[in-house]
């Protein structure tokens, strides 16, 4: 696929409001010329995340994350560079230009763009038909009976497909689309006699959009008595893959990032009811078991997923399958038991506002009290077991042990072991012995069973003293470029702690006046150091004396490393190195400020 021109990319960066983009993921407050907030990339209590609208970059002084508006969208939404550029261009109204590309690739891109345009036009038609036509009155009554207000219905673009056989077919052709394109978009289908007719008729229609808000397909609910199937979806196509999308993700993704969790429900109206109740991080799997692609989509925004699926047996089985699908992914799955055994839409469907508000509060409490999937699994096993007989309790224990053995050694597991023993009226020591035996049986021969790995921590890696010192010096060089250029000429990669820092040094030597301009994207480590230096330059004092002191400290560190290397080789360090270290120590002592009494 062709690339965007450099001029297009620069126009996107100029047009995109980085404070607006970042502000969707964390609250920002103005601090002088910058904005500060809690870092959206790692857990912290004191704001260390800085956004500079004038220079168009962000930087975290805690975890060292940094970049421009494009890299922020890439990181937070899990997009490739070109996808992030396209998303920002769509959002801020920038027309993109491409370099020359293969004619076949260009044709495919144009075809997909036409299909998306066709789907968007059709979604707008369905939405207007819901509100403007007499035929859709029953649909409006049904939605009102579910306590779904006009505001949330319009926000999600809910519509109605007319009962006529060819409204979309004829309208699409009049707009210049071929029957083949209408069929490829999943809007019409071939009849037995060879003609085509509308796929969706006399149904409430829910547009299914991707993260960028582009219509991919539709889900449609029957209204007429005996109309089958109850729910009809767009067919799988080059644009629509049911298992790769989540209903409502385009409106929920920012809320997911802020709430640091996603709430997964089953159907379209569950999402609408949840959003209307203020639970804006809700998305739906549209009646199917959650897939690896859907988990991956959510994992780009959060590491905690709360499943609030139907409380019936099918819903419970779906939650257990989700745990297997999540195996190996860096996400924590939890399960919320929806009050009264209802799905969210049913719970929130009360006509009286006060009753509906109380139901919403109960749902929020249930989400806050969600339990990890292993605990849910074990409790489901015990709930279904025949605990009145010893044989039934043994069978329940056998199934529960499969879950317990797979859990890491933790307080949560110990508590669950005690809960199992209590429910089975068994000695906890017996359960522990059975766990040990089951673990040995499951492990490879001659090897002890390994505990399940914990999810990787998002805590930032602490910088060493030498790394902090060198990054401070680079920041001061950016802040005071006249003196800084003299220091950069004296610094060598050998003074620095890593190859990436050495590459940052070389970059700053030739880009000191504007270090972020043209910063290469194929060297993330180097870019992170340069961005950090540019960000720190806005708040670090930069005097010739401070820069000289920092340089002397790095020089002394270099000499000490050379002395250590000589000692490791078994010889005495050269006298010249020892003399140089003593001289540097004396100069540093004279240069360092005297502590106040």
Image: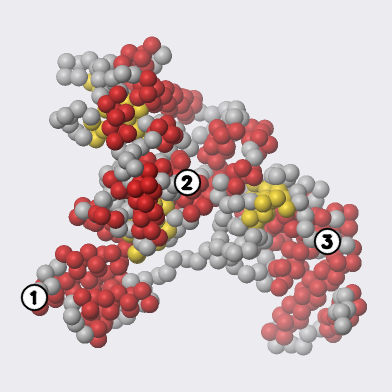
* Quadrant of the drawing holding the C terminus: bottom right
- Of the numbered discs in the image, which one, if any, rests on residue 389? 1
Q: Please tell me which residue is depicted at 21% across the width and 35% down the height of the picture.
A: 230
Task: Give the side of residue 493 with respect to residue 313, left or right.
Answer: right
Q: Residues within 10 Å of mark 1 (few under 14, many from 20)?
A: few
Q: Which residue is at the far top?
A: 174
Q: Quadrant of residue 395?
A: bottom left
The residue carrying mark 2 is 253
Rounded to the nearest angstrom, the CA distance separating label 2 from label 3 is 39 Å
Q: Quadrant of residue 426?
A: bottom left
Compared to 393, does 112 lie above or below? above
- Viewer-closest of 74 and 17: 17
Task: Give the side of residue 179 with respect to residue 594, left or right.
Answer: left
Q: Please tell me which residue is depicted at 68% across the width and 36% down the height of the picture.
A: 14
**First-in-chain label (2 vs 3):** 2
The residue carrying mark 3 is 541
Q: Residues within 10 Å of mark 3 (few under 14, many from 20)?
A: some
């Amino acid at each position: 696929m062709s690339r965007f021109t450099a001029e297009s990319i620069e126009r996107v960066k100029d047009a995109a409001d980085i404070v607006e983009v970042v502000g969707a993921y964390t609250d920002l407050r103005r601090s002088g010329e910058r904005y500060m907030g809690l870092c959206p990339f790692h857990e912290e209590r004191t704001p260390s995340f800085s956004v500079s609208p004038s220079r168009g970059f962000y930087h975290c002084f805690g975890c060292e994350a940094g970049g421009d508006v494009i890299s922020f969208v890439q990181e937070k939404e899990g997009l490739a560079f070109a996808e992030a550029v396209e998303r920002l261009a769509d959002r801020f109204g920038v027309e993109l230009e491409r370099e020359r590309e293969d004619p076949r690739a260009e044709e495919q891109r144009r075809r997909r763009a036409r299909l998306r345009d066709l789907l968007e036009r059709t979604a707008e038609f369905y939405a207007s038909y819901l509100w403007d036509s007499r035929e859709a009155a029953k649909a409006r009554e049904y939605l009102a009976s579910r306590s779904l207000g006009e505001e949330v219905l319009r926000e999600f673009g809910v519509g109605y497909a007319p009962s006529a056989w060819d409204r979309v077919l004829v309208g699409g052709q009049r707009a210049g689309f071929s029957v083949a394109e209408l069929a490829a978009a999943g809007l019409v289908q071939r009849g037995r006699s060879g003609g085509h007719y509308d796929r969706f008729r006399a149904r409430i229609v829910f547009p299914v959009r991707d993260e960028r808000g582009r219509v991919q397909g539709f889900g449609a609910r029957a209204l007429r008595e005996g109309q089958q199937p109850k729910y009809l979806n767009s067919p799988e196509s080059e644009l629509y893959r049911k298992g790769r999308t989540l209903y409502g993700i385009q409106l929920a993704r920012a809320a997911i990032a802020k709430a640091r969790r996603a709430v997964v429900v089953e159907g379209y109206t569950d999402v609408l009811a949840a959003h209307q109740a203020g639970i804006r991080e809700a998305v739906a799997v549209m009646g199917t078991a959650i897939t690896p692609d859907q988990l991956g989509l959510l994992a780009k925004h959060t590491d905690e997923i709360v499943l609030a699926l139907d409380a019936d047996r099918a819903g419970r089985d779906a939650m257990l399958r989700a745990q297997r699908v999540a195996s190996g992914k860096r996400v924590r799955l939890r399960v919320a038991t929806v009050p009264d055994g209802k799905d969210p839409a049913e719970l929130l469907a009360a006509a009286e506002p006060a009753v509906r508000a109380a139901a919403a509060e109960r749902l929020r409490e249930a989400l806050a009290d969600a339990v990890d999937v292993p605990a849910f699994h074990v409790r489901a096993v015990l709930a279904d077991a025949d605990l009145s007989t010893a044989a039934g309790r043994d069978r329940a224990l056998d199934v529960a042990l499969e879950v317990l053995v797979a859990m890491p050694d933790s307080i949560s597991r110990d508590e669950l072991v005690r809960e199992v023993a209590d429910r089975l009226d068994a000695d906890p020591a017996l359960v522990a012995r059975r766990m040990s035996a089951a673990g040995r049986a499951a492990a490879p021969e001659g090897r002890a069973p390994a505990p399940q790995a914990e999810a990787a921590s998002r805590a930032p890696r602490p910088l060493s003293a030498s790394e902090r010192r060198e990054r401070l010096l680079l920041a001061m060089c950016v802040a005071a470029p006249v003196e800084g250029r003299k220091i950069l000429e004296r610094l060598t990669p050998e003074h620095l702690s890593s190859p990436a820092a050495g590459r940052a040094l070389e970059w700053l030597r030739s880009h000191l006046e504007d270090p972020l301009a043209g910063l290469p994207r194929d060297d993330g480590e180097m870019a992170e150091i340069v961005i950090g230096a540019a960000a720190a330059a806005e708040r670090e004092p930069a005097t010739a004396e401070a820069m000289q002191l920092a340089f002397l400290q790095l020089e002394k560190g270099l000499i000490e490393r050379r002395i250590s290397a000589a000692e490791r080789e078994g010889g005495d360090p050269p006298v010249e190195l020892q003399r140089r270290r003593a001289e540097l120590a004396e100069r540093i002592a004279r240069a360092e400020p005297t502590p106040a009494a």
